[in-house]
Image (cartoon, rainbow, N blue to C red):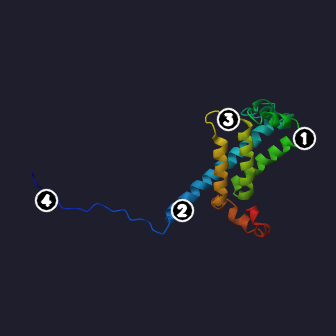
Amino acid sequence: MTTTPHRRHVPAPVMEPDGDRGPTRTTRVAAGRALAVLRILYGLTFLWAFVDKVFGLGYATKSGKGWIDGGDPTAGFLGKGASGPFESFYHSLVGDFWVTPLFMIGLAGIGLALTLGIGMRIAAVAGTVLYLLMWSAVLPPENNPVLDDHIVGAVTLIVLALVAAGNVWGLGQWWSRLSIVERYPWLR
C-alpha cells in the first residue's frame, strides 16, 4: 500500500436542507418568468386558433372557409371529427345558432385574458371547460387511453390561475386593483 504524503484530507461538501426558508428569490423570479412565458404561449395558441378560424388562413381552417367567408368553424369538427360515446351529442350541435359564436368568443376571450394576464380565473375555468369538451368529443384519445393534450392544457390553465401567472409580464396586478375586481375576486 502506498501513501501520498502531500495529500490533504478535504471533507466532502454537505447539502443542507432549506428548512422553512422556501425557494430563494432567484428561483421565485425564474419560476414566475417561466410561468409567464407558458401563460403567454397558451394565450397565443387560443388567439391563433381564433384568427385562423375567422380568416381561413390555410392552416387548421382552409383558405376561403373562414368564418368571415361564411364558413362554420365548428361544423367540420363537430360533424365529422367527433367520435366515441358522445358522438351523437356533438353531431346534434352542428348548425345550432349559438354554438359557433360562443366557441369563437371563448377562443378570443381566453386568448386575450391569458396573453394579457387578466381575468386568469375566468380564463382558466372557460379554457378548462373548452378543453374538456374537446377531449370528450374524441374518445378514447388517439395516443393514450385517457390522457391527451387537452387534459394537459386544462391542468396547465388551472395552475396558471392558481399561481397568479398574470402578475409577471402581464396586467394581472393592475387588473386585480380595479374596483369591480376587488368587489368580485372571482374576476381575477
Distance from disc 4 to disc 3, alpha carbons, whole Å, reads: 68 Å
Q: Mark 3 = which residue?
A: 140
Mark 3 lies on a secondary structure that is loop
Q: Amino acid at mark 2?
A: Arg
* Mark whose residue sits in front, 1 or 2: 1
Residue 65, by quadrant, is top right
| Residue neighbourhood size for the residue with mark 3, other residues' Cα within 10 Å, grouped as few (<14), some (14–19), many (≥20) | some
Mark 2 lies on a secondary structure that is helix
| Residue neighbourhood size for the residue with mark 2, other residues' Cα within 10 Å, grouped as few (<14), some (14–19), many (≥20) | few
Residue 29, by quadrant, is bottom right
Query: What quarter of the picture does the C terminus occupy?
Result: bottom right
Question: Which of disc 1 and disc 4 is earlier in sequence?
Answer: 4
Distance from disc 1 to disc 2, alpha carbons, whole Å, reads: 46 Å
* Mark whose residue sits in front, 4 or 1: 1
Question: Which of disc 1 and disc 3 is earlier in sequence?
Answer: 1
* Mark whose residue sits in front, 3 or 1: 3
